[in-house]
Amino acid sequence: MNKKIFGKQPSGERISGKTISGKGVRGSHIFHNKPSYKPIPVLAAAAFFAAAPFPADPVPAAFFPAASFLTVPVPAAPIPAYAAGWMQDGGRTAYELEDGSRPKDTWMELEGSWHYFDDQGFCRTGWYVDGQGKRFWLDGDGVLAVNTVRRIDGKFYAIDENGYCTEQKNYSGWVQEEGGWWFRRPDGSWPMAEWMEFNGEWYHFDDQGYVQSGWFEENGNRYWLDMYGKMLRDTEMVIDGIRYGFDRSGVSAREVKGPVEIPPEDQKTELERAVDAMADQVLAGIITPEMNDHQKATAIYYWVRRNMSYSAGTGSIGDWPAAAYEGFRRRRGHCYTYYSVSLALLSRAGIPSVEVIRETDFDHWWNLVYVDGEWLHFDTTPRRLGGDFCLLTTAQLFAYSDTHDASHVFDVSQYPATP
């Protein structure tokens, strides 16, 4: 983490200062060992090798002359060093640098936010006025407010990108507070539990007057409000893996969950490229150009079943490229690993795949694949009670699930239909 410290000229303007490189460790100390060198008799070293579980004669006897000494490093006493980070001192907050000192009477940028430290090194909150009389507002956590409008002590202030505060008389518009954003009308009132149109966009406010985001339901209709509170209209959007369409009035119509999106080749990470290479190596030995998708999927299914072993608690969850990488390397894992390895192979074979999650406990994953014009279930994870789940219809999968502890329960309306 880089920390930029800025000092002040007599005029109060901020000037660029030095950059201090930190370790990013907060509230703790680390120790560096400074090695010193002391002579140790060869006999002591030879005794160590004789007692250690090494192969016989790890060091030839001729290596140690009879009266010689072997010089080896022995750690000296630890010398304390400081890890830069936040600290509490008498109920107030300060920031300690690597050398144990604190920034004082200066601005400092930490993790993308600006803070001001007083002449005792404590982080300021509330109002700060510089030498030119410019006013800044520092929130309760000491972060400088920027690009916003705040109501402070009953007055409204517009705050620019540099943090300069300008009082707004008879202000009407958006205001940001701890509870979120709200809108002040010219008469001083604000919308509550209602819709409001502003600059051609629609917003909905809760019963406290704060603009809402996410799903909002009214009169049996569902609307999606983005992170800024704007209602989506006349568009489509994938939310939680499910594609929704929104009409001109903003009412949503849920569509089925879509296939896992594979990034373009030029946008893939190093890890994703490594997974592709592993998958390609496997596919080169199990599929041929004349195979149709059904045959390719079948070959992939049985390769995974024959070359992976189940291991509960082993592997990543939620990041399929990472889980696939672990699965290819270790050849073992839990159901998410099986799902991810299968997804990697299927995607490289050009077969679309939808992630299916058991809805009873959200603790089992499998693939729903599109082969030769139809969607079919594809679960490579072996089960204690047995079963083959290669390209099954939903009816076939439910028939097994109904007699095997509800192994595969999911909302069919959220997924593409099988034959």
Image (cartoon, rainbow, N blue to C red):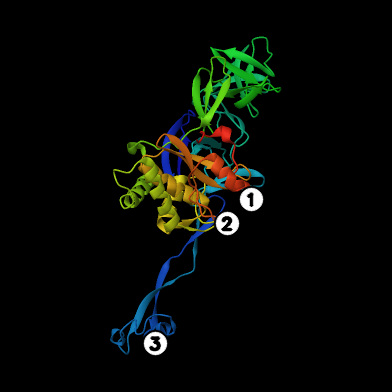
Camera-near label (2 vs 3) is 2
Q: Residue furthest bottom?
A: 66
Q: Position of residue 3 (x, y in %)?
A: 46, 42
Can I make out residue 93 in this image? yes
Disc on res. 43: 3
Q: Position of residue 138 (x, y in %)?
A: 59, 31
Work out whether 322 lies above or below 17. below
Tag 2's secondary structure? loop
Residue at (65% x, 19% y) in the render? 155
Distance in Å between CA atoms under marks 2 and 3: 62 Å
Work out whether 15 lies above or below 49. above
**Disc with the residue nearer the chain's start (3 vs 1):** 3
Q: Evaluate if marks 2 and 3 touch, with contact meaning CB atoms under 8 Å apart.
A: no
Residue at (30% x, 47% y) in the render? 288
Residue flagged by tag 2: what amino acid is it? Leu
**Disc with the residue nearer the chain's start (2 vs 3):** 3
Q: Residue furthest top?
A: 187
Q: Which residue is mark 1?
A: 405
Residue flagged by tag 1: what amino acid is it? Asp
Q: Position of residue 18 (x, y in %)?
A: 41, 41
Q: 302 or 84, which is in the foreground?
A: 302
Residue flagged by tag 3: what amino acid is it? Leu
Q: 179 or 374, which is in the foreground?
A: 374
Q: 97 or 139, which is in the foreground?
A: 139
Q: Evaluate if marks 2 and 1 touch, with contact meaning CB atoms under 8 Å apart.
A: yes
> In the image, is 272 to the left or to the right of 357?
left
Distance in Å between CA atoms under marks 3 and 1: 67 Å
Q: Which residue is mark 2?
A: 385
> In the image, is 60 to the left or to the right of 322?
left
Other residues around mark 2 within 10 Å, as few (<14) / some (14–19) / many (≥20): few
Query: Which image quarter is the N terminus in?
Result: top left
**Disc with the residue nearer the chain's start (2 vs 1):** 2
